[in-house]
């Protein structure tokens, strides 16, 4: 049987992917380019696909489950280069990248759409679900688009990478309130939002280094919110006032 | 005297000056993914990676911090050991044997 090896670039790093299902590559569009040879970095085995199915909604197709599972596998490759997928809505505002992160269904996209409606033309979506964070040698962290843009498919796969400016952890609550988090308070949540379960000490140390760079680069806030316009205005005012400092 | 062994796959690291224990995927069904430690606990963890018992920990602690109140410090170390055992980060090792379940 003909192998299905394709190369996909994430944050400038090529990952060679063997697709289990031929239709999965359609999720990547022109980002997946066929390459010669049989060597690959990532492959979702039938066993892994079956296991992944158990953790995802029943109405997801097999090729969508494979597509989702490839993020984590690709992170094992990317972490060697100081990069990793991160579960967040990422948008560009004033030439810098901002991340809204939270468990699914907590209103990340709602905050983005509110902001776009309240302040037309101010912000653009970089990635709607899992951008790549890149730690550079100078200590800065850059946010790259990725093919994983969430249920609404909001994102621009060709958006240029932008320097990270800030992170907001979202929580649903009866009142709108925002507060700055210390590094100690932010570490557990940030760690859990990376799309990588480390297998080795090197991967743990790679994630720790990336998290360290993120926290040194960008302030982190926690926004408890109702998902209404007032919460979005509170968010915008806070980011406007606190965008030049980090932990 | 019971000696202790840190669980294979759990790594102590530092992020922005905060000490953190992080578990590899293979042991995340046994112990938490991420747990923060204070500076003294991180020091004790480093001693435990080379297989220390309670007396070893007290001696190392005294050498490092010149303890004012050894009895209170011993209680604190015992409490730390209990917590690490409860979280499954630590395994008791008896003389000539082990309780290890890895």
Image (tube, coloured by chain):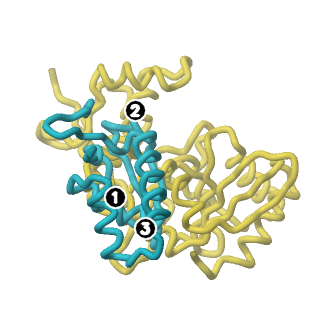
Q: Position of residue A10 (x, y in %)?
A: 36, 54
Sequence order check: which comes first, mark 2 or mark 1?
2
The CA span between labels 3 and 2 is 36 Å
Residue pictured at 47% horizontal, 56% vertical: B75
Residue pictured at 44% horizontal, 35% vertical: A68
Judged from the image, the secondary structure of the residue bearing numbered disc 2 is loop
Tell me, for residue A145, which label it has, or none. none
Q: Is B77 placed above or below A65 here? A: below
Q: Position of residue B54 (x, y in %)?
A: 32, 54
Residue under circle 2? B29
Q: How many marks?
A: 3
Judged from the image, the secondary structure of the residue bearing numbered disc 3 is helix
- Please name which of the two marks, 3 or 2, marks the residue nearer to the observer: 3
Q: Which chain is yellow?
A: A
Nearer to us in this view, B97 or A211: B97
Residue pictured at 29% horizontal, 44% vertical: B7
């Amino acid at each position: 049987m003909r192998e299905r090896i394709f190369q996909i670039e994430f944050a400038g790093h090529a990952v060679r992917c063997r697709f289990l299902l031929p239709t999965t590559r359609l999720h990547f569009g022109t980002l997946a380019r066929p390459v010669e040879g049989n060597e690959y970095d990532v492959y979702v085995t039938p066993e892994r696909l079956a296991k992944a199915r158990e953790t995802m909604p029943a109405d997801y197709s097999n090729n969508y489950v494979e597509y989702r599972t490839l993020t984590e596998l690709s992170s094992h490759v990317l972490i060697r280069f100081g990069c990793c997928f991160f579960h967040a809505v990422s948008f560009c505002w004033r030439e810098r990248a901002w991340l809204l992160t939270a468990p699914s269904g907590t209103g990340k996209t709602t905050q983005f759409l509110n902001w776009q409606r309240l302040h037309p033309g101010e912000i653009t979506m970089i990635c709607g679900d899992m951008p790549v964070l890149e730690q550079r040698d100078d200590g800065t962290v850059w946010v790259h688009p990725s093919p994983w843009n969430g249920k609404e498919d909001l994102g621009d796969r060709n958006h240029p990478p932008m320097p990270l400016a800030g992170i907001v952890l979202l929580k649903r609550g009866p009142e709108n309130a925002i507060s700055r988090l210390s590094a100690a308070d932010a570490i557990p949540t940030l760690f859990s939002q990376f799309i990588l379960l480390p297998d080795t000490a090197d991967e743990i140390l790679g994630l720790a280094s990336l998290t360290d760079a993120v926290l040194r680069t960008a302030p982190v806030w926690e926004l408890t919110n109702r998902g209404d316009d007032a919460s979005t205005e509170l968010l915008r005012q806070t980011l406007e006032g606190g965008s030049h400092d980090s932990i | 005297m019971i000696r202790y062994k840190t669980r294979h796959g759990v790594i102590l690291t530092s992020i922005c000056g905060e000490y953190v224990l992080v578990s590899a995927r293979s042991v995340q069904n046994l112990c938490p993914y991420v747990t923060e430690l204070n500076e003294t606990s991180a020091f004790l963890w480093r001693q435990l990676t080379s297989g220390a018992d309670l007396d070893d920990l007290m001696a190392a602690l005294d050498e490092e911090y010149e303890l004012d109140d050894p009895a209170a410090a011993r209680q604190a170390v015992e409490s730390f050991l209990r917590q690490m055992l409860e979280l499954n980060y630590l395994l008791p090792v008896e003389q000539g044997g082990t309780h290890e379940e890895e």
